[in-house]
Amino acid sequence: MTENTEKLLDDVGWQLLYLLQENARLSFKELGQRVGLAPSSVAERIHRMEEAEILLGYHAQINLEKVGLLILAFIRMSTPGQNSARIAQILAALPEILECYRLTGSEAFIMKACVSSVKQLEILIDQLSQYGQPTTSLVLSVPLTRRIVEKR
């Protein structure tokens, strides 16, 4: 952690991060009231956190079932090492892949995929099979959706 990052992550900085993770739509005025700063000071601190890439973005959380994406799966894939960069590009172009992580060990990637039907999942698995050996696990439920990162 750099000295600049340490300054941004004082107690007030962590309070702001916590509040934004709970509700990123809070106004600078509301955030300021909760942490004891003027709205302009809050805006400046948040801007500096964005510049330092501590805050990477603000996102809407979507109910996948409500938009017709009924099946959530994790797909692990083994692949020859020399293909990893190419495969990462291919995965980025597949809209069914919500997230992808490159791994150590026997499997090169783990992907979070969402599809509307078993048939669509089968098509996706067939596409991925061209580049390696996929192993798929269907999600039955999600007991923990998102954890707030706190100062440790």
Image (cartoon, rainbow, N blue to C red):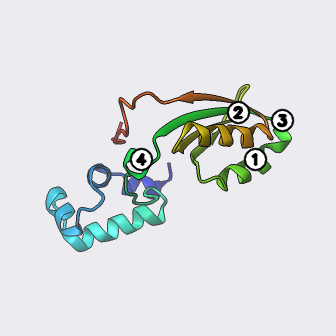
Q: The residue under label 3 is which amino acid type?
A: Pro
Residue at the bottom extreme of this rendering: 40
Q: Is residue 14 left or right of residue 109?
A: left
Write down the residue under mark 4.
64
Write down the residue under mark 3.
80
Q: Position of residue 139 (x, y in %)?
A: 48, 30
Write down the residue under mark 1.
87
Mark 1 is surrounded, within 10 Å at the Cα level, by few (under 14), some (14 to 19) or many (20 or more) other residues, namely: some
Q: Is residue 109 above or below residue 58?
A: above
Q: Secondary structure at mark 4?
A: loop
Q: The residue under label 4 is which amino acid type?
A: Leu
Q: CA distance from mark 1 to mark 3?
A: 10 Å
Q: Which mark is residue 77?
A: 2
Mark 4 is surrounded, within 10 Å at the Cα level, by few (under 14), some (14 to 19) or many (20 or more) other residues, namely: some
Q: Position of residue 101 (x, y in %)?
A: 62, 41
Mark 2 is surrounded, within 10 Å at the Cα level, by few (under 14), some (14 to 19) or many (20 or more) other residues, namely: many
Q: Please identify the quarter of the rendering in which residue 147 is found.
A: top left
Tag 4 or tag 2, which sits nearer the N-term? 4
| Residue pictured at 67% horizontal, 56% vertical | 93
Q: Is residue 63 left or right of residue 127?
A: left
Q: CA distance from mark 3 to mark 4?
A: 32 Å
